[in-house]
Image (cartoon, grey):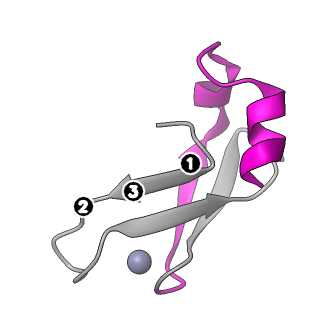
Amino acid sequence: MANQTIQTPTASADHFHRWRIDEPNGPVSIGTCKVCGTTKQFKNWLSDMDFITNEEHRIAA
Ligand SMILES: [Zn+2]
């Protein structure tokens, strides 16, 4: 869930949102859907888990 690009099935949209997450800046980051521009807040504590590294963040950016 903490990947730079997150696909979320959403009943109100006709596509899977592809979240581009801003650089962490406090307890939450703002993700912007690359498809429709919708924004959503993502909790940054997820990125503290070890299944994604800072290097992976740079590659995905
Ligand atoms: Zn979208």
Against 47, is 43 above or below? below
Ligand 1: quadrant of the figure:
bottom left
Q: Which mark is residue 7?
A: 3
Query: Which comes sooner in the sequence, label 3 or label 1?
Result: 3
Q: Is residue 25 magenta?
A: no
Against 60, is 11 above or below? below
Residue at (63, 63) in percent of width and height = 20
Q: Comparing marks 3 and 1, which lies closer to the viewer?
A: 3
Q: Is residue 58 magenta?
A: yes
Q: Which residue is mark 1?
A: 42
Q: Position of residue 28 (x, y in %)?
A: 67, 45
Label 3 is placed on what type of residue? Gln
Q: Is residue 50 left or right of residue 23?
A: left
In the displayed orientation, state which residue is furthest to the left. Answer: 11
Q: Comparing marks 1 and 2, which lies closer to the viewer?
A: 2
Span of residues in magenta? 36-61
Label 1 is placed on what type of residue? Phe
Q: Position of residue 50 (x, y in %)?
A: 65, 12
Residue 26: tell me if it is visible.
Answer: no
Q: Which mark is residue 14?
A: none
Residue at (32, 68) in percent of width and height = 16
Q: Which residue is mark 2?
A: 9
Q: Position of residue 19 (x, y in %)?
A: 53, 62
Q: Is mark 2 within 8 Å of ligand 1?
A: no
**Tag count:** 3
In three-dimensional space, the C-alpha distance between marks 2 and 3, rounded to whole angstroms, equals 7 Å
Q: Is residue 23 left or right of residue 5?
A: right
Q: Secondary structure at mark 2?
A: loop
Residue at (69, 51) in percent of width and height = 29
Residue 15: tell me if it is visible.
Answer: yes
In the displayed orientation, state which residue is furthest to the top. Answer: 50
